[in-house]
Image: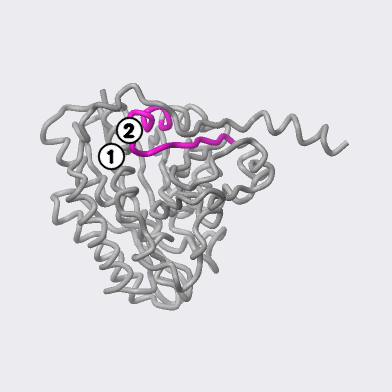
Amino acid sequence: MKLRLVLPVLFFFVFIANPESTLAENEPMIDLEKTIERLENHLRSLTVTIGERSVLYPNNLKKSAEYIQSFYEGIGVPVHCEAYPYRNFTVENVVAEISFGDSPSKHFVLGAHYDSVAGTVGADDNASAIAVQLETARNLINLKNHQELDLLVKFVSFPLEEPPTFGTRHMGSRVYAQKAWKEKEKIDGMICLEMVGYACHDPGCQNYPFPLMFFGYPKQGNFIGIVGNLSSQSLTNSLAKTFLKNPELPVVKLTVPLGGWILPSVRLSDHSSFWDRGFKAVMVTDTAFFRNPHYHLASDTMDKLDYPFMAELVESLLLFFQSHGT
């Protein structure tokens, strides 16, 4: 009886791994060496200079928001903070915008949370994602100076994704998605960056939630994952198809039914706030605790991360925005 219930659900899951690319000879869009250096600098600023960014350190949350805001100001990108109260202090969604015209028809959100769980400086979770977000913006503004695209991208950095606020109305992404829904903001797709800096190459180092371990997924954690719900399947497929153009970063995609509730681990980030408001959204991830043994531990430090891996993700994201602005 249980088998009859499970099997129909399993057919909803979609898999692509280690694909061959027809564009393998293409030159990178970005300067990989400079990007690697800049990613490391962001990690050092967020995890060493600032340190733990949990609700226990509201001043560090403020410093993180200020760091992100000053970065955008420094590269000439319009940015503002949307503050809201939590307990006896204030936190901020940091919102930057790159528009390639006065009224582009395609609108995307690239989001990541900048807080860390208590007791850790959160290098992979989630300073890695903020670093990739920032360097994607830097390269997109450079692209704007050389190419006309029909495109607007909002870069939104969220606070309070981690416990004890996860799943509550205090999450920065919940606040933003609620506002976007209420104001009928046009969002063609929300891309959530969640833990994108850890790779492992030993056979068996990559794990999966039930029942995905039976589906022939890669045993090495050298790929980036893209997870979407059924309503976001077109976005999931489009993102994965574009990522295939970068042969240096293998990609696995997964589509989950029932808003992801059938596989709760795929809801554990800011994209679920957008799913719940009816927006198309995907999570881009290194698979978190299914790969990274330092998840939510004090050992989640910047020396554990794979910066070339992260730089290739910047490249893949640039390819996506370029291809979807033409």
Q: Position of residue 91 (x, y in %)?
A: 38, 67
| Pointer 1 residue | 315
Q: Secondary structure at mark 2?
A: loop
- Circle 1: residue type: Glu
Disc 2 and disc 1 in contact, CB within 8 angstroms? yes
Which residue is at a point 43% across and 31% down the rendered structure image? 240
The answer to whether residue 78 of the structure is visible from this angle is: yes
Q: Which of the two residues, 104 or 317, is positioned nearer the viewer here?
A: 317
Q: Secondary structure at mark 1?
A: helix
User: On residue 246, which mark appears?
Assistant: 2
The answer to whether residue 189 is above or below residue 33 is above
Q: Position of residue 66 (x, y in %)?
A: 25, 66
Magenta segment: 239-255
The answer to whether residue 106 is above or below residue 54 is above
Query: Which residue is outermost to the right?
Result: 1
Q: Which of the two residues, 227 or 301, is positioned nearer the viewer here?
A: 301
Number of dots carrying numbers? 2
214 left or right, relative to 168: right
Which residue is at a point 45% across and 52% down the rendered structure image? 200
Query: Which residue is outermost to the left?
Result: 145
Crowding around mark 1 (Cα neighbors within 10 Å: few <14, some 14 to 19, many 20+) is many
Q: Find residue 19 and report its image quarter.
A: top left
Which residue is at a point 40% across and 26% down the rendered structure image? 20
Q: Earlier in the sequence, mark 2 or mark 1?
A: 2
Which residue is at a point 41% across and 62% down the rendered structure image? 159
Q: Is residue 240 magenta?
A: yes
Q: Nearer the viewer, mark 2 or mark 1?
A: 2
- Circle 2: residue type: Asn
